[in-house]
Image: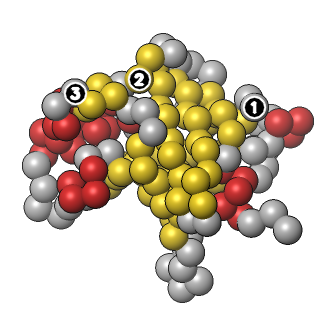
Amino acid sequence: MLLWEDRYVGLWADGNRSKIEIRKVRRHRFLVTFLRNNQPVNRPWMDDMPSTNMHAQYIEDTLDGSDFVVELSGSDGNYSLHLHYEEFDYFLPKNGEIISTAISGPEHGDKDIMEECSSRFLCHDHFHRIQ
């Protein structure tokens, strides 16, 4: 049986210049690589670590809804990229799977880091499965 979280696994592109590769490590645990112009994105708030093999977790919550969370600042930083999978895009009925993105951080976190995360990882176009 295909778990909902398994639908995220694969290679996704936004048709512009960004790609996301998602690999499952074990149940609810993933490694995510984010590329822009086919290159990893540096994270200055983490000594310029590249956006390769970032830890991610699929959180199942029947009350609040499930969430796919990618750690942008390590396990202690609380800056995250959220991925939202949808099965059908009405604009592309033949290739209907999409992923949209959102960014989150601590309520009283560093505004500069939040702006850096948004400018580097937030995509305004949907990602479509390419593999």
> Is residue 20 visible to the viewer in this orientation of the structure?
yes
| Tags 1 and 3 touching, CB below 8 Å | no
Which of the image's four quarters has the N terminus?
bottom right
Cα separation, mark 1 vs mark 3, equals: 28 Å
What residue appears at the point 73 percent right and 29 percent down from the top-left corner? 130
- Is 79 placed above or below 107 here? above
Which of the image's four quarters has the C terminus?
top right
Query: Which class describes the residues within 10 Å of circle 3: few (<14), some (14-19), or many (20+)?
Result: few
Q: What element carries label 3?
A: loop
x, y percent for residue 126: 60, 37
Give the amino acid type for the residue marked by disc 2 in the picture.
Answer: Pro
- Is 109 placed above or below 65 here? above
Q: Give the numbered dot on residue 48.
A: 3
Residue extending farthest to the front is 25
Query: Which class describes the residues within 10 Å of circle 2: few (<14), some (14-19), or many (20+)?
Result: some
Query: Which class describes the residues within 10 Å of circle 1: few (<14), some (14-19), or many (20+)?
Result: few
**For marks 1 and 2 on the same chain, the one whose residue lies earlier in the sequence:** 2
| Tags 1 and 2 touching, CB below 8 Å | no
- Choose between 31 and 7: the one closer to the eye: 31
According to the picture, the residue beneath numbered tag 2 turns out to be 40
Give the amino acid type for the residue marked by disc 3 in the picture.
Answer: Asp
x, y percent for residue 64: 50, 79
x, y percent for residue 113: 17, 41
Q: Give the numbered dot on residue 131.
A: 1
- Choose between 70 and 28: the one closer to the eye: 28
Give the amino acid type for the residue marked by disc 1 in the picture.
Answer: Gln
Q: Would you say 106 lies left or right of 24 here? A: left
Q: Would you say 121 lies left or right of 86 here? A: left
What residue appears at the point 51 percent right and 15 percent down from the top-left corner? 38
